[in-house]
Image (spheres, helix red, strand yellow):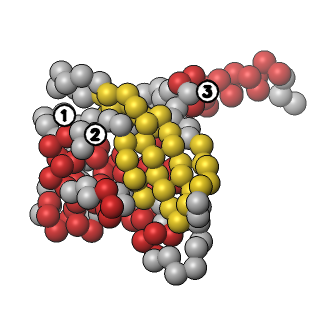
C-alpha cells in the first residue's frame, strides 16, 4: 500500500516532468491580458499588438478578409453589435482597410483610403472598445461604446465614442440596413 508521502512524491515528479516537457517546446510564455473588470473595457475587442501581415496578394486577400482571418459573418450581424466591433478592430489592426470600411454604413461614406490615412503607419494601432449600451429611437437601434486608439509611432492617443446603428426590423428595410454598421466615431477626422 502506498503512503501519502510516496503518492505526493510521484505527483510532484510527474508534474515536474510535465513542466520540463512544456519548457522544452521553446514556446513563449503567454502574456497576461487585462480583464474587463480591471479595465472597464470589453476584452474581446482589445487589440494589444499588431500581427504581421501575411505574404499574400494584399488586394485580393484583403477584399475577402482572408489576410486577417476576419469573422466575415459579423457583416450580417443583427443581434450582437460587439461582434461587428471586433471585426472592425481586427481589420484595422492588420491594415485590412477594405474590409474595415465594410463595417461602416453607406451613409458614412467611409473609404479604405480614409481609414489608411487615419490608422496606417509603421506600427498598427492598439484599439480598446469598452462595453456599450443599446438604445432604440424612431425605428432604429443604436449602440454607443467608449473607444481608445493608441499609436506606437508617437501620434497622440484618441479617446471618444463609436456609434453603431441598425434598423429595428422595419418592413421594407434592406439587408444592409438590418445589419449593425458603424455610423460615426469621435476618434476619426471627418
- Sequence order check: which comes first, mark 2 or mark 1? 1
Q: Residue at 33% across / 32% down in the picture?
A: 149
> Circle 3 sits in a helix, a strand or a loop, which is it?
helix
Above or below, 75 relative to 25: below
Residue 34 percent coordinates (x, y): 50, 27
Residue that sits furthest to the right in the current view: 1
Residue placed under numbered mark 2 in the picture: 188
Residue placed under numbered mark 3 in the picture: 37
Residue that sits furthest to the front in the current view: 138
Q: Is residue 137 left or right of residue 109?
A: right
Q: Residue at 53% across / 66% down in the picture?
A: 167
Above or below, 154 relative to 45: above
- Sequence order check: which comes first, mark 2 or mark 3? 3
Residue 190 percent coordinates (x, y): 24, 44
> Which quadrant, please, contains the N terminus?
top right
> Circle 2 sits in a helix, a strand or a loop, which is it?
loop
Q: Residue at 32% across / 35% down in the picture?
A: 187
Amino acid at each position: 500500500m502506498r503512503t501519502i508521502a510516496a503518492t505526493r512524491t510521484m505527483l510532484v515528479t510527474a508534474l515536474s516532468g510535465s513542466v520540463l516537457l512544456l519548457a522544452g517546446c521553446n514556446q513563449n510564455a503567454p502574456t497576461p491580458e487585462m480583464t474587463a473588470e480591471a479595465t472597464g473595457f470589453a476584452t474581446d475587442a482589445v487589440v494589444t499588438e499588431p500581427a504581421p501581415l501575411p505574404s499574400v496578394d494584399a488586394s485580393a486577400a484583403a477584399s475577402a478578409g482572408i489576410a486577417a482571418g476576419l469573422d466575415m459573418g459579423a457583416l450580417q450581424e443583427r443581434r450582437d453589435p460587439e461582434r461587428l466591433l471586433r471585426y472592425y478592430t481586427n481589420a484595422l489592426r492588420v491594415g485590412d482597410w477594405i474590409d474595415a470600411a465594410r463595417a461602416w454604413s453607406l451613409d458614412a461614406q467611409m473609404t479604405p483610403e480614409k481609414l489608411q490615412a487615419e490608422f496606417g503607419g509603421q506600427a498598427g494601432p492598439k484599439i480598446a472598445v469598452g462595453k456599450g449600451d443599446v438604445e432604440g429611437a424612431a425605428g432604429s437601434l443604436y449602440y454607443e461604446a467608449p473607444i481608445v486608439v493608441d499609436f506606437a509611432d508617437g501620434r497622440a492617443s484618441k479617446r471618444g465614442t463609436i456609434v453603431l446603428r441598425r434598423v429595428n426590423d422595419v418592413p421594407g428595410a434592406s439587408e444592409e440596413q438590418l445589419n449593425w454598421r458603424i455610423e460615426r466615431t469621435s476618434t476619426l477626422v471627418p
